[in-house]
Image: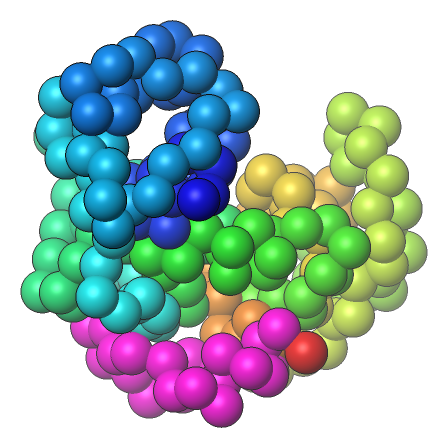
Amino acid sequence: MDRLQKIISAAGVCSRRQAEEFLRAGRVTVNGAAASLGDRADPARDEIALDGRPVVLPAEKIYLMLNKPRGVVTTLSDEKGRPTVAGLVSGCGGRVYPVGRLDMDSEGLLLLTSDGAFAQRLAHPSHQMEKEYHVTVTGALTGCRERLEALRLLEDGTPIAPARVSVVKQGKGTLVLSVVIHQGLNRQVRRMCALAQLRVERLVRVREGSLALGDLPKGQWRFLTAEEREALLS
């Protein structure tokens, strides 16, 4: 017997926190009766439903990496009709949800899974998994690496840990910077660049922890190996 929020999360329907909200709202039933936060059930014997739709655990948990293109939103559905990451991974064999986010204008490595416990562990602040971005910038390029590494506060006063910044490529009036952070606050790299008087022309996440994007084509995905999953959690 497991708590209902754990079962719903493991089924890939939503995160555990969202499942708790659904339970509080009375949207979950077990064998036809309304369930409450804290209730337990056996998914092998009990009929669990969310808004009348059965909650079914997948035969195997799904772990995958997507190379998210620009212009795609990191949601399972979008009320404005914009393309979503769910549409890009619809052939993976089950319902998965993103681990963390990439804003619509950003590209690159995005993890998706049906394993709620795996997602929560990776996203927890104590895990502090490194994230590396390749950022094409224009603007005040002279001394920009030092200015970015010196930042300790965002524009709203939120404290940030020091980033590691290096130059990947230099062009005419542009730089491609490698920016490594581990907090992953909302639009953190873009906000840091704005404070350093830089304009972001392109932002690509190329690594999370030990997992690199590599040569995975834009808009394509692949399953993670068992070794890759273990390395991410280590």
**230 displayed left or right of 5:** right
**Residue 90 at x, y = what percent?**
11, 57
The residue positioned 83% from the left and 46% from the top of the image is 160
Picture quarter with the C terminus: bottom right
* Frontmost residue, 158 versus 33: 33
For residue 3, above or below residue 33: below
Corner quadrant of residue 7: top left
Q: For residue 86, say whether it is visible.
A: yes
**121 displayed left or right of 107:** right
- Extent of the magenta region: 210-233
* Residue 195 is inside the magenta segment: no
The residue positioned 90% from the left and 56% from the top of the image is 150
**40 displayed left or right of 174:** left
Q: State the scheme by which the image is colored.
A: rainbow
* Frontmost residue, 199 versus 71: 71
Residue with the most extreme top position:
25
Residue with the most extreme front position:
45
* Frontmost residue, 151 versus 92: 92
Q: For residue 105, say whether it is visible.
A: no
For residue 49, above or below residue 166: above
**Residue 175 at x, y = what percent?**
58, 71
**Residue 200 at x, y = what percent?**
52, 52
The residue positioned 49% from the left and 79% from the top of the image is 229
Corner quadrant of residue 53: top left
The residue positioned 77% from the left and 25% from the top of the image is 156
For residue 152, above or below residue 133: above
* Frontmost residue, 226 versus 127: 226
For residue 150, above or below residue 160: below
**Residue 39 at x, y = what percent?**
46, 25
Picture quarter with the N terminus: top left
